[in-house]
Image: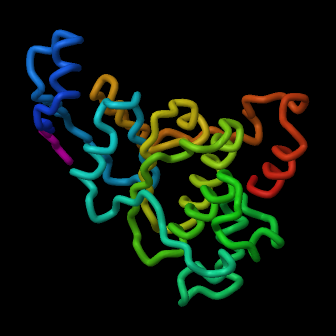
Amino acid sequence: MPTFDIIKQVKPSKTFRVASVIGKFDLQSENIVEHFKGDIEIPEQWQVGLIVGKSGTGKTTIAKQLFENAYITSYEYTNETVLDDMPKECSVEQITSAFNSVGFSSPPSWLKPYSVLSNGQKMRVDLARAILEEQKFFVFDEFTSVVDRNVAQIGSFAMQKAIRKTDKKFIAVTCHFDVQDWLLPDWVFNTDTMTFQSFEGQKKIDLKLNLKYSKQEISQYGRCLLSTII
């Protein structure tokens, strides 16, 4: 059971600007202290976890402290195509299968460099790469933070579905509570309240029968993507 008791302390030099802010806002001290304490009672059988909370509640600090070796913020992309940025030991079939599994299903886009992709495409490429890497456990910070919320929700569903077809474990770290219903995590740690909730043993919702949006509300893009990942 990971337990954390983290104290973050910042004491900036007392420059003119720092002194001005302290005086203007009547701060008692320029010494800034944050304290994060709690327990994450991870169940024995799990594959998808979620650390969620508002900005400044300690999500990144806690994830780095508890899962330092698995913590990921981004990958390096240097090749002319995202195909060639995937792990060298993977076959083309394995790579395209991973792309499809996370909803990145456009062959022309596979031939583009990472830098020209949309934010939504970049997110899916990052997730596909995490699946293809040899690492069995990874923690992804800022999960879905830079994408449209519809894309984030559909991408979350695709990600959990892809992970559950492997022997990997994945923790999403995000400030967006809306992904929970789509990521279907086995456990959730809420940094707003420092509380843990396990869903171990509970049957996962079949989103094919319980979509949140009516057919009229799902865009043509969404319907195409759903038909790919479901």
**Residue visible at 46% across and 51% down in the picture:** 48
**Residue visible at 30% across and 28% down in the picture:** 195
In this rendering, is residue 16 above or below 132? above
Residue 190: x, y in percent? Answer: 36, 31
Q: Would residue 203 be counted in the magenta stretch? A: no
Quarter-of-image position of residue 146: top right
Q: Is residue 220 left or right of residue 32?
A: right
**Residue visible at 46% across and 34% down in the picture:** 175
In this rendering, is residue 166 above or below 151? below
In this rendering, is residue 191 above or below 111? above
What secondary structure prevails in the magenta region?
strand
In this rendering, is residue 157 above or below 191? below
Q: Nearer the viewer, residue 59 or 188?
A: 59
Residue 171: x, y in percent? Answer: 42, 51
Q: Is residue 168 left or right of residue 22?
A: right
**Residue range of the region highlighted in magenta in the rendering:** 1-7
Q: Would residue 2 be counted in the magenta stretch? A: yes
Residue 178: x, y in percent? Answer: 57, 31
Quarter-of-image position of residue 164: bottom right
Q: Is residue 183 left or right of residue 227?
A: left
The number of callouts visible is 0
Q: Nearer the viewer, residue 12 or 214?
A: 12
Q: Nearer the viewer, residue 175 or 168?
A: 175
**Residue visible at 34% across and 25% down in the picture:** 192
Colouring used for the render: rainbow
Q: Nearer the viewer, residue 45 or 62?
A: 62
